[in-house]
Image (spheres, rainbow, N blue to C red):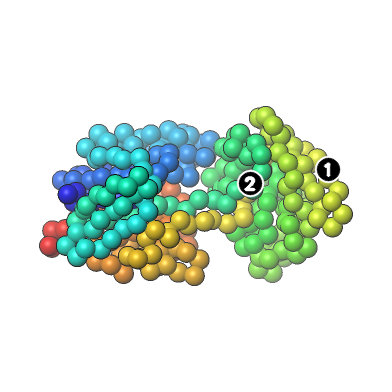
Amino acid sequence: MYDIIIVGAGPAGLTAAIYARRAEKSVLLIEKGAFGGQITFSPKVENYPGFASLSGTELADHFVEQALGLGADVEIETVTAIEDCGSHKVVRTEDGNAYEGKAVIIAAGAKHRHLGLPNEEIHLGEGISFCAVCDGAFYKGKTVALVGGGNSALQEAILLSEGCEKVYVVQNLDFLTGEQALQDILQKRTNVEVLLGTVVEALPAAAPLRSVTLRRVADDHTYDLAIDGLFVAIGLEPENTPFAAVAALDERGYIDAGEDCLTTTPGVFVAGDCRRKAVRQVTTATGDGAVAAIAACRYIDSL
């Protein structure tokens, strides 16, 4: 039996593993995909303390190297359920395995909604971005398009407009859904053009991304738009259904926990983008990882 089982090996999960191992707790990390989480999609990170500039993949590699160097065990599997057995928890996976731990930290993250178009994977991190805070500076003086019309999308567009020569906001509806105050700010930006009733129809078959094909919904007219980068802000998707039995979810599917990272089940903690929070950045994820690990260690020591 492990002291702590951590579901997810993004910045939150890896930080939790580092803190738990330094507290001399046995740790199992279970990750279903790539180590590092969403940060690996960023070609360059310039807002993480201690590093002036490095790629998201390099930053993730630092996390992984440190966690594994401290002795954390790893399994590449998809978690399907967590069972509360009182004195211990059982984490079940798609492969039919069951792992027992005194405590569990859920750090499953949240994935950005993609456009779902052919060739999209080719351009992820190489022309397509999901974070203006992370990657907007790389397009200073250039032309970009942003897909989305909600609050997050408009905030991203405002940020991009401060450095980009031209920003196109592509919204599938005939109106923006973000707050009027944000719309008012955008309307005053002379370098912003809003394309309503329009969708991205196709992406180039090869990198680099230099244009996208747009389609007007009303008449199905298609045309190519020359851009240097495409930002997608159509929401996040938490994948917390397997954890609903041990952690209450809010109306959007995020684990309903505050800054203390406590769930409704003693011995089950949450960290990172999968929990309810206002700011989702790599620094807030690592902060959660530290808080959750310390809380889990205290819980185990109290048993």
Please provide percent x and percent y for residue 99: 25, 49
Query: Which residue is label 1 attached to?
Result: 223
User: How many numbered marks have been drawn onto this rendered protein structure?
Assistant: 2
As measured in the structure, the alpha-carbon distance from the residue carrying label 1 to the one carrying label 2 is 19 Å
Identified by mark 1, the residue type is Tyr
Q: Which of 81 and 184 is in front in this view?
A: 81
Give left or right: position of 170 versus 246: right
Q: Which of 174 and 246 is in front in this view?
A: 246
Query: Which residue is label 2 attached to?
Result: 116
Depth check, mark 1 against mark 2: the one in front is: 2
**Which residue is painted at 73% across and 56% down in the image?**
171
Please provide percent x and percent y for residue 173: 74, 61
**Which residue is painted at 54% across and 56% down in the image?**
236
Q: Can residue 284 be seen in this view?
A: no
Q: Which of 163 and 135 is in front in this view?
A: 135
Element under label 1?
Answer: strand
Q: In this view, does 264 lie above or below 80?
A: below
Give left or right: position of 147 versus 294: right
Residue 68 is tagged as: none
Query: Quarter of the image holding residue 249?
Result: bottom left
**Which residue is painted at 43% across and 52% down in the image?**
109
Label 1 crowding class (10 Å Cα cut-off): few <14, some 14-19, many 20+? few
Quadrant location, the C terminus: bottom left
Label 2 crowding class (10 Å Cα cut-off): few <14, some 14-19, many 20+? few
Give left or right: position of 153 versus 168: left
Q: In this view, does 149 lie above or below 282?
A: below
Identified by mark 2, the residue type is Gly
Please provide percent x and percent y for residue 70: 22, 37
Q: Is residue 273 above or below residue 200?
A: below
